[in-house]
Image (spheres, helix red, strand yellow):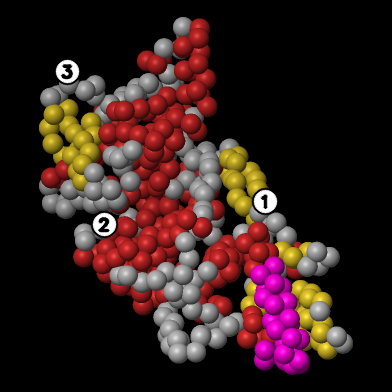
Amino acid sequence: MVTQFVLRSDKKDKAGRCPVHLVVYFDGARLKCATGEKCRPADWNADKQKFRASYPLAEEANDLLARLTSDTLAWWRKLRAAGEKPTLEGLRGVLRPAPAVGEAAVEQQSVGVLYEEYRQSMRARGYAWETLRQHIVARNWFTGFEQWSGQLLDPVTYDLARHDALLGYLREVRKLAPNTMYTAVKDLKSFLRFLRDERGLAVGIELRKLVAKPADSPKLYLTAADLEALATVVLPANLVATRDVFLFCCYTGLRYSDVVALHPGNLQEWKEGRVLRLIQSKTRAGVSIYLTTAASAILDKYADSERLRLLPVHPNQVMNKYLKRVAKLAGLTAAADLVSTDHGGIVRAAVPKCELVTMHTARHTFATQSLLRGMPVEVLQKVLGHKKIQTTLIYAKIVEDFQHHTMRRIWEGQGAPDRLGALDKQVCAVEPLAA
């Protein structure tokens, strides 16, 4: 008996993937059957009849092919001992064994139904709206795979082969970025863990095998000169409010979800100044943020006793669209390094900074500029509302100037923290903690 694995490039699907077939030769007889595996021609090594390393989880997929070969050989030996001839139906039974006699076949369920049960359970337990919204996105990814592949993501029968197919769909069809892929796998694992531990479902895969790692992605932040350019540029009337709200977030570190909900009840007097006290929408952490002169001036500009909100904030998509125009008019056209991935490789491109600015850039800007001005990381953690200081330390890693100034101060006694940054310290200053 001789077995071969062949990629049927003549049966390419819309995603460019071709089915892998098993061809078996028995004493002159030839049988051919689909294995259920698919890949792009670039991910298949025709000479070695196996998946290349570029295929997601190639090692596990090749182990599957080896198992199919072993099962086919065992089947052939039984037939030969019994004096029977191999048939196509018999080969299909080896590749896709039917339930044992007396064992009822389990009806497969769509992941959409079970995932909605999981999400409703999270809602009942009081999870934040942003978390519930993210799980709606995850549910749509998984149900989208079912529609695209024609296969159900049933947790009971979920295995590494199906997992590889899902990853291929998310990466190649949905074009998800590496960190979004990480989020998808993380959400899938928490969903399967819920079914296994809290609903008693026999999940068909060990969760430790579902591995995903986040990628280090550059975080765009604005320099002191960029902030000065934004603050002084002359803009059309319809863009002024967008610029002001963005700068306010640069001076306070607020997310869009928090600045859009600010109301007079969040504003309180504190000594000779004012502070914002609020519960963050994303993490539900309470924060207290001192309002610097620049931040207070923006609030005073839009002070209106009849206004329900402190600032005129547009929908997030509108804000991001306007911000790109604001940044371009302010001259933020220097090239920024845009890093992406494609077919397993890193793709770098020079893109004008103005095209990459979003509302979340303000939070990155506040964090990095605060560090550059010497704010202790522990204080920055409290202002940003991070639960873990490791999250705050990410900003310290991406600011090369912060690293260089710190080394020079420690080793050469130069560049004291109070001299860092060219912009007036009032812009991002934070009131010292009370003794």
* Labels 1 & 3 near each other (Cβ < 8 A): no
Q: How crowded is mark 2: few (under 14 residues within 10 Å), some or many (20 or more)?
A: some
Is disc 3 placed on a helix, strand or loop? loop
Please say if 17 is above or below 28: above
Residue 149 vs residue 388: left or right? right
Sequence-first tag of 3 and 2:
2
Magenta portion: prevailing SS class? helix
Residue, disc 3: 435
Say whether residue 87 is magenta. yes
Q: Identify the residue at image location x=55%, y=77%.
A: 148
Tell me what residue is drawn at x 48 percent, y 66 percent. 205
Q: Name the residue under label 2.
A: 128
Label 1 and label 3: CA atoms lie apart by 52 Å
Whether residue 238 is visible here, answered yes or no, is yes
Q: Position of residue 210 (x, y in %)?
A: 50, 58
Q: Position of residue 21 (x, y in %)?
A: 73, 78
Magenta-drawn segment:
65-90
Q: How crowded is mark 1: few (under 14 residues within 10 Å), some or many (20 or more)?
A: few
- Could you tell me which quadrant the N terminus lies in? bottom right
Give the residue at mark 1: 345
Q: What residue type is labelled 1?
A: Gly
Q: How many marks?
A: 3
Q: In which quarter of the image is the C terminus?
A: top left
Residue 311 visible in the displayed image = no
| Residue type at tag 3 | Ala
Check residue 83 for magenta coloring.
Answer: yes
